[in-house]
Image (cartoon, rainbow, N blue to C red):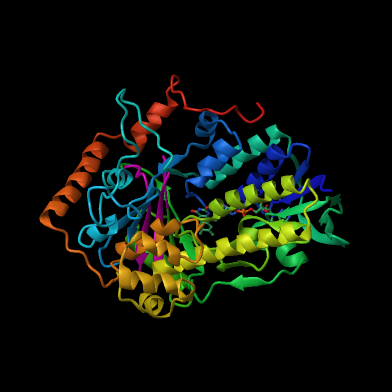
């Protein structure tokens, strides 16, 4: 039976894992070992909506306290500066996988010419607003938001919560692992200490000390679908720029650049392929387009892919130690949260004695998630025809999207209909049909059965959109909404008990 779990690493992945395990299975002893000398990666600042749900609803962390300490801002989606339209908004609610009662066709058929403000969050994004305004003037904070959150602040808050719930910490650098009959039996620190446990979470970041190094699990590269392998990272202190309620993903000559909005800091980075451009040339393009960025931006190298199995013997990989894809949809923390919920459920169900079939199921589910993410990101590259550079020509021609070929073929013949969902690789896909339709319609991927709206339909379509715009214009921007939630009288609905305070 598992009694003691050792979590290797205290980046955001290790700490979310440690808190989730201790909070949901309090009888476990959970021990984090981490090296302050190696530190944390320090990048990773955009999330998806399952992240606030995991923190507040699943772990019961107090919203009030979290907002005070971590100082997140809100993200309603991603503004893609992408494709032949030049731009479109991907929100966290349904814009295209919908069918309004008063129109004969699903929404996507009305977006050929103008795909903007097709939902309230999209209208909020277009108008720089975070939330609609309630009758009493307060922001109506909807569940269709995610966060922008600074990695360092986030890690600091998680460590406070972890200590409060009873997670123990040891500082030291792991230099090796001892094998036992059921996998790893102990880790060795470079000062000679030896720490035993029954079960291990490898959250050692790209070093993957246990899953990759000690257990030598093979790494499955995604390089036929995702060609980028580096990023230059550099932000600046905010001056007069408005705090945008979304992440921006901008097409660059040899990749794309993110812009993530913190209250006092703008975080910018350029993801590129080292085959297509040198680090110096990437930094030059980045600085030319972002004159406020630091003169020597940091270069981060990565490889896209994941370990073949995420759970091997008594080791589960979490975070960058288990796999990585570029932050085009900010999916890393999304996977950490959802995988931890699955692992906790499996451990509870098996009364802390998980049989091999449970492990195999975990590996099948997590491999499917990684494949979904690979295919969804690959589609972003395949259909982006905004620039005619060698890199983008290579992406348009050579990106492997064979795993979603049935969906693409169906879309080509039938257009943005809800029936496409039956051609997704998996129905429980994290992005849902909505994500795929936004990419296909947003990038004007051609389909055969165009619908020409009648003037009456066009009037209905325009009326709905102008209603969204009118409501959005009355809304509050990020700064105004932050002022509300920081007011001493502000009450969060359904505020959960603070974590063991
Ligand atoms: C360019 C870039 C942009 C990104 N953007 C996003 C984003 O927008 N959204 C998102 O969700 N994710 C993003 N990510 C991913 C993000 O980095 C991770 O989701 C997140 O930070 C979790 O990291 P981690 O905890 O796995 O690793 P790390 O932060 O690297 O932590 C590793 C931990 O292991 C410890 N450690 C390692 N080796 C040893 C050892 N031998 N002994 C003891 N301790 C050890 C370290 O000290 C550290 O505590 C991005 C990543 C990159 C590279």
**Would residue 404 appear left or right of 3 to someone viewing this image?**
left
**Would residue 439 appear left or right of 178 to someone viewing this image?**
left
Residue 190 visible? The answer is yes
Q: Residue at x 38, y 45 (%)?
A: 76
Q: Residue at x 47, y 46 (%)?
A: 49
Q: Which quarter of the frame holds ligand 1?
A: bottom right
Q: Which region of the structure is painted magenta?
A: 241-267
**Would residue 179 appear left or right of 168 to someone viewing this image?**
right
User: Between residues 47 and 446, which one lies in front from this camera angle?
Assistant: 446
Instruction: Specify the quadrant that holds the C terminus.
Output: top right
**Is 235 rendered above or below residue 388?**
above
How far across and down, in percent of the image, does residue 479 sit?
A: 35, 35
User: Between residues 376 and 42, which one lies in front from this camera angle?
Assistant: 376
Toward the left, the furthest residue is: 455
How far across and down, in percent of the image, does residue 84 sit?
A: 26, 67
User: Between residues 257 and 330, which one lies in front from this camera angle?
Assistant: 330
Residue 271 visible? The answer is no
How far across and down, in percent of the image, does residue 163 sit?
A: 70, 35
Determine the image quadrant of residue 16. Answer: top right
């Amino acid at each position: 039976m598992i009694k003691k779990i050792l979590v290797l690493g205290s980046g955001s992945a290790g700490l979310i894992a440690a808190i989730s395990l201790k909070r949901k299975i309090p009888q476990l002893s959970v021990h984090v070992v981490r090296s302050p000398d190696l530190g944390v990666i320090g990048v990773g600042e955009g999330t998806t909506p399952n992240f606030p749900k995991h923190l507040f609803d699943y772990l019961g962390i107090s919203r009030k306290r979290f907002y005070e300490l971590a100082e997140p801002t809100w993200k309603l989606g991603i503004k893609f500066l992408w494709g032949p339209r030049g731009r479109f908004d991907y929100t966290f609610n349904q814009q295209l996988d919908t069918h309004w009662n008063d129109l004969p066709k699903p929404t996507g058929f009305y977006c050929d010419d103008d795909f903007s403000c097709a939902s309230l969050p999209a209208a909020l994004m277009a108008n720089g607003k975070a939330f609609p305004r309630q009758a009493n003037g307060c922001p109506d904070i909807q569940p269709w938001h995610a966060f922008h959150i600074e990695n360092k602040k986030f890690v600091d808050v998680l460590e406070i919560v972890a200590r409060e719930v009873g997670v123990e910490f040891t500082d030291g650098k792991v230099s090796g692992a001892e094998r036992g009959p059921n996998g790893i039996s102990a880790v060795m620190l470079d000062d000679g200490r030896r720490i035993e446990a029954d079960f291990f979470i490898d959250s050692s970041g790209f070093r993957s000390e246990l899953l990759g190094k000690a257990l030598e699990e093979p790494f499955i590269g995604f390089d036929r679908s995702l060609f980028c392998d580096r990023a230059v990272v550099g932000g600046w202190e905010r001056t007069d720029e408005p705090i945008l309620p979304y992440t921006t993903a901008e097409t660059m000559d040899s990749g794309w650049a993110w812009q993530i909005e913190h209250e006092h800091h703008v975080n910018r980075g350029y993801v590129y392929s080292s085959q297509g451009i040198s680090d110096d040339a990437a930094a030059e393009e980045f600085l030319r387009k972002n004159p406020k960025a630091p003169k020597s931006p940091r270069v981060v190298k990565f490889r896209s892919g994941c370990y073949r199995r995420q759970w091997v013997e008594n080791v589960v990989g979490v975070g960058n130690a288990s796999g990585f894809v570029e932050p085009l949809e900010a999916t890393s923390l999304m996977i950490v949260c959802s995988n931890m919920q699955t692992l906790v459920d499996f451990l509870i169900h098996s009364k802390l004695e998980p049989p091999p079939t449970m492990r195999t199921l975990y590996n099948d589910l997590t491999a499917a998630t990684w494949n979904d993410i690979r295919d969804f990101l690959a589609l972003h590259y395949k259909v982006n025809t905004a620039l005619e550079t060698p890199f983008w020509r290579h992406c348009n021609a050579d990106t492997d999207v064979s795993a979603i070929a049935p969906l693409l073929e169906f879309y080509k013949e039938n257009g943005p209909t809800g029936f496409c969902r039956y051609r997704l690789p998996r129905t429980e896909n994290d992005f849902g049909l909505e994500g795929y339709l936004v990419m296909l319609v947003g990038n004007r991927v051609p389909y055969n059965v165009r619908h020409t709206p009648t003037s009456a339909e066009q009037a209905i379509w325009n009326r709905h959109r102008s209603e969204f715009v009118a409501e959005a214009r009355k809304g509050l921007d990020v700064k105004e909404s932050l002022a509300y939630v920081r007011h001493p009288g502000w009450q969060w609905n359904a505020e959960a008990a603070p974590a063991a305070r």
